[in-house]
Amino acid sequence: MFMSMDKAIGSASVRLSKKIARIVNHHLKEFNITTEQWAVLRTLYESGLITQKTLSERSDKDKATLTKILDLLEKHAYTERVQNPEDRRSFLIQITVKGSRLVEEVGPYLNEVYGEIIEGIDQEKLSLYQEVLTSLEHNIDTLLVYESNRKKE
Amino acid sequence: MFMSMDKAIGSASVRLSKKIARIVNHHLKEFNITTEQWAVLRTLYESGLITQKTLSERSDKDKATLTKILDLLEKHAYTERVQNPEDRRSFLIQITVKGSRLVEEVGPYLNEVYGEIIEGIDQEKLSLYQEVLTSLEHNIDTLLVYESNRKKE
DNA sequence: AAAATATAGTTTGTATACGAATTATATTTA
DNA sequence: TAAATATAATTCGTATACAAACTATATTTT
């Protein structure tokens, strides 16, 4: 069975992720926002005024993708691009009052949804799940760095 | 800390999934195929001749998405749509010899990649990780069914 | 059997992911 | 300091996700 690992870990992780996004999107629909926009907005709420570059790193969004997401968040007046006085190439991204209010409203609501998602699973197992999640992510980060370095040579 | 669950479980799972797809895509590039095309092709390899509908369910692909993926797989002659003699609306999807050969080549190779991804993580923890993954998926499936039923009323 | 309903697959529209090219500006090097 | 290189952000092209509308065909209801 040559694809046991693949099936067990990779496919299952990817499949779960899509389902999480699907159900969260259902719940976020009434707020006119998507899972990914939420991830960016929440990161911004927690970070305060940061550059688009930094926001891209912290929210794990590609710069091209982030451009689009910020366009949408701006359209709803949840965020604003402000010229960075220290570097004319860059923007500082500012969450608006409306954006902050949304985070404060949606945050607790989403936590209820997550309560349903983890229902019946031991806290202990969940902690271990998170731990493995982190290890896997770390391994992949290492591999990705290695590959991108190899590419440059 | 009102978004702990969101951050700990949701965002982390989604982030990991994207990274898995990213690194696997890097490796699959030389075969001119993507992670998602691979998932479909592998499912088909394991299932034999099945309808597009069934393939959609087994590979967890939306029917619209699957249409596009099959278009691409067909372009590379890895699969074919065959008229279903029992139902003129439907197609049977057939993996070609070229497609089978690809699966047999890529499968073991991908398993090596997954070996690197899980490097240094206890087998026991990985099993538990999978177990939680399954439970979470099950919970979400239940919630999604519940929601889609509510919608119809 | 005709009408109503359900189903398989495609198309369309919007959002996301991401590599590559492009533009404007900074930083480094010769 | 002029030239080369690096960086921040946008744009473009291709792939995926998914809801909704649409087409063709099946199935069920009356």
Image (spheres, coloured by chain):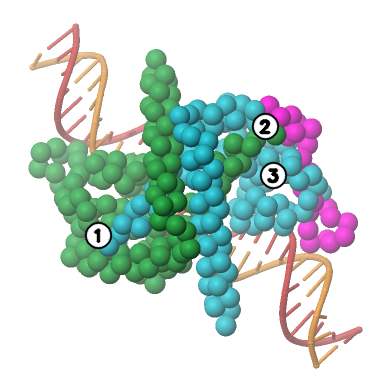
Chain colours: A green, B cyan, C red, D orange
Residue at the spot of label 2: A2
- Quarter in which the N terminus of chain B is drawn: bottom left
Mark 1 falls on what kind of element? Answer: loop
Residue at the spot of label 3: B43
- Find the magenta span and give its range: B83-105
Q: In this view, does A152 lie to the left or right of A46?
A: right
Task: Using the rendered image of the protein, determine whether residue B11 is visible from the camera's viewpoint.
Answer: no
Separation (CA) of disc 1 from disc 2: 44 Å
Residue B99 position (above or below residue B81): above
Separation (CA) of disc 2 from disc 3: 13 Å
- Residue B10 place in picture, x, y as percent: 40, 54
State the residue in front, A2 or B83.
A2
Q: Which mark is residue B42?
A: none
**Mark 2: amino acid:** Phe
Q: Please tell me whether mark 2 or mark 3 is closer to you in this view.
A: 2
Residue at the spot of label 1: B1
Mark 2 falls on what kind of element? Answer: loop
- Residue A9 place in picture, x, y as percent: 55, 41
- Quarter in which the C terminus of chain B is drawn: bottom right
> Dot 2: few (<14), some (14–19), or many (≥20) neighbours within 10 Å?
some
CB atoms of marks 2 and 3 within 8 Å? no
Residue B147 counted in the magenta span: no
Query: Given the image, what chain letter belongs to the residue carrying mark 3?
Result: B
